[in-house]
Image (cartoon, rainbow, N blue to C red):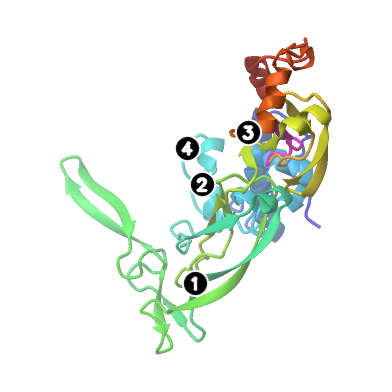
Amino acid sequence: MKDDFYNILGIDKSASASEIKKAYRKKAIAYHPDKNPDDPSAEEKFKKAAEAYEVLSDSNKKARYDQYGHQAFEGGGFGGGGGGGMNMDDIFSQFGDIFGGGGGGFGGGFGGNAGRRTVKGSNLRIRVKLTLEEIANGVEKKIKVKRKKVAAGTTFNTCSTCNGSGQVMKIQNTILGRMQTSATCNTCGGAGQSVAKKPANADAQGMLATEETVSIKIPPGVVDGMQLKVSGKGNDAPGNGISGDLLVAIEEIPHESLQREGDNLHHDMYISFSEAALGTSKEIDTVTGRVRIPIESGVQSGKILRLRRKGIPSINGYGTGDLLVHVNVWTPKTLNKEQKEFFEKMTEDPHFQPKPEEEDKSFFEKVKDMFS
């Protein structure tokens, strides 16, 4: 079972953003590998602190963690946080904010290999279409993904040009004197390694195109256009680099009878004159199945019936929206002779005269209530 992020940083849930940053800075300094070269456990504590800070410093990730714990990031990590697959480059990239400058603040490297950089494979992007029901309840999708992987039997040697650092140093004479700059090694592309042996069907970098079925856990409440990240399911990196990520864009399939507005849903219900006068009951679709709604006699067109918690769960864990049913009394466009005579007789009948009561709000009041 994973350690609690708050316990790792030594803070409680009420800690402010500045307190979270201060706690992480203290842990990062204490467990930095360059300060603890003979302590193997320091690196693990260093990574745990960085993983905790990555989640707790982001308000959206923190809200989901507070509600669901580590389960909020299972199946690849929601929004890219808490995946547990952080590498040292990812961790050091946070230090510009924590220590006030680039690099790790201890020589800019890790484990005494300051010039070495970890190469990450390229990311892949896919689009997943979801029904409103799937969005409301959450779903696990199994998607076939074409990704490049290091072919079996491929071996690598340390790049002779950069000696495994992935960078080459250049010295130039300028009017200010001799200046030294670094650039990505052209021989290995920054990987620090070159292919020594590879199968005949692999490409020049020892990579092979494969098809893999990836399981993607999609939490309830996602919205159209949102992007999820499944860590490590992109293309492999050459040599001993880390795999890229699979970026999953969400596309919402329009529903036949429900319209989404944030976490709330809307449904237009049409009833006849007689149903409005006598009262009735109607079945409608919801994201959790069909329900029957009683309609009282004398209902007015434009009335809004609110079905609480029948909408979409909040992606940030702030409860569930409502289903708003808009009642529309359908006026017939054609009448036969008998029907026409009936309505002509009722023209002066007091029961057919409009008598709005105090609870019969105006259109603008109903709109105001709907958005409040």
Label 1 neighbour load within 10 Å: few <14, some 14-19, many 20+: some
> Considering only order in the chain, which callout, 4 or 3, is on the residue closer to the N terminus?
4
Which of these two is toward me, 167 or 72?
72
Question: What residue is drawn where x is 83% and y is 27%?
Answer: 297
Residue topped by disc 1: 146
- Number of the label disc, if any, that sits on residue 335: 3
Residue 185 appears left or right of 29: left
Question: Can you say which quadrant of the picture contains the C terminus?
Answer: top right
For the residues carrying marks 3 and 1, which lies nearer the camera in this image?
3
* Distance between the alpha carbons at the discs numbered 4 and 2: 10 Å
Q: Answer few, some or many: residues within 10 Å of disc 3's Cα (few below 14, many 20 plus, some between 14 and 19).
A: few
Can residue 283 be spotted in the picture? yes
Task: Give the CA separation, mark 1 to mark 2.
Answer: 29 Å
Q: Earlier in the sequence, mark 2 or mark 3?
A: 2
Which amino acid lies under the numbered mark 2 shown in the image of this protein?
Ser
Q: Amino acid at mark 3?
A: Leu
Q: Quadrant of the N terminus?
A: bottom right
First in residue order: circle 1 vs circle 2: 2
Per the image, label 3 sits on a secondary structure element best described as loop
Can residue 29 be seen? no
Q: Nearer the viewer, mark 4 or mark 1?
A: 1
Labels 4 and 2 touching (C-beta < 8 A): no
Between 250 and 44, which is closer to the camera in this rendering?
Answer: 250
Q: Residue at x 65, y 55 (%)?
A: 83
Circle 4 is placed at which residue position? 101
Q: Nearer the viewer, mark 3 or mark 4?
A: 3
